[in-house]
Amino acid sequence: MLHPGQTAINAATRLCAIFGSPVRHSASPAMHNAAFAELGLNWRYVACEVRPENLREALAGARAMGLAGLNLTVPHKLLAVPLMDELHETAKFWGSVNTIRFEGRKPGGPWLPLAEFDREPPAETRSHGFNTDAEGLSISLSEDLGVELPGAKVLLLGAGGAGRTAALKLAESQVAELFLVNRTASKTEEIAAEIRQRWPRVKVVVGYPRGRVNLVVNATSLGLKPEDPSPLDEKAFPLTQAEAVYDMVYKPAETKLLAAAKAADCRTASGLGMLVWQGAVAFMIWTGKQPPVAIMRNAAEHSVYAR
């Protein structure tokens, strides 16, 4: 079914995709296809299940096929960093890649987005990795929860690609205290050491806090599946000690963590806002056009809540 204003797929249609494992929950296709239609772009966005051991080949295939760009989700954001031909300053600063723009150039010319090569394919191509997660998280925490990060006490669950980016963004935002919890302690210790070096004024602790916090953030993938346990050990940290809880998982709309947080009278928000804002920045990176954020949010909400 075509969106209003959307043309049928033809030989000139530009493709973007999201790679992940799992990926069937993703609202990104609905969100981006609605945005392409709103601006009258002959583009499409699809979701591809890509296991981590196949990521290198999948990236090479996308590049060879002339895709305009990619998003990466669990578990690819850290794995992709050494696989990029070029890293944007955002990917270097936050240490992970969630957005890729494929670029090309004619002999001796500048590197340009593949979207600018309408007729003849470029002589050379490359992958250019970006990170839009950090900006998306910051905007969503402010808009959806009203959280002021400077001076806040935050408990962060998870130390994978999303967790690492979140930890660094929270530290860069000058939270007062940051508590890091992860199933694999060594990953948490690495992030803590990096934060202590880069932002020495931020107090970073590995483990659960003993007192109250302003914010709990789940950056794990626990909650995507109905059988998943909560990422939070409530025996170690009761939710009654938290003012607000943010779950980066946005589908289902209410995870076990968010349900428990509501029962404990916490302010809550899912990661839908982060999805929208990181996607809006990615949209601009690929197309060079201002993203229709309201349209993207409506499409994402319909994808998550209408089922």
Image (spheres, grey):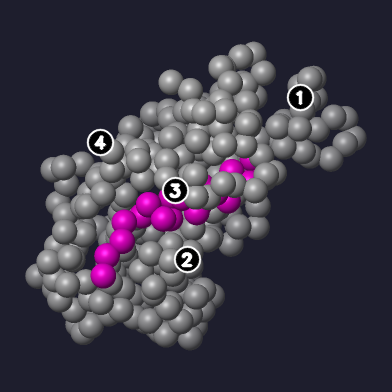
Secondary structure, mark 2, is helix
What is the spatial separation of the Cα atoms under label 4 and label 1, in whole angstroms?
38 Å
* Circle nearer the N terminus (4, 1): 1
The answer to whether residue 121 shows anywhere in this view is yes
Question: What's the magenta bit mostly, secondary-structure-wise?
Answer: helix
The residue that mark 2 highlights is: 138
What is the spatial separation of the Cα atoms under label 3 and label 4, in whole angstroms?
16 Å
* Circle nearer the N terminus (3, 1): 1
The residue that mark 1 highlights is: 118
Q: Which residue is painted at 26% across and 49% down in the image?
A: 253
User: Mark 3, mark 1: which one is toward the viewer?
Assistant: 3
* Circle nearer the N terminus (3, 2): 2
The answer to whether residue 53 shows anywhere in this view is no
284 inside magenta stretch: yes
The residue that mark 3 highlights is: 297
User: Mark 3, mark 2: which one is toward the viewer?
Assistant: 3
In the image, residue 297 sits, relative to residue 190, either above or below, namely above
Front position in the image: 7 or 224? 7
* Circle nearer the N terminus (4, 2): 2
**Outermost residue to the top:** 11
Secondary structure, mark 4, is loop
Secondary structure, mark 3, is helix
Q: Residue 307 has which mark?
A: 4
Region in magenta: 267-286
Identified by mark 4, the residue type is Arg
Q: Residues within 10 Å of mark 2 (few under 14, many from 20)?
A: many
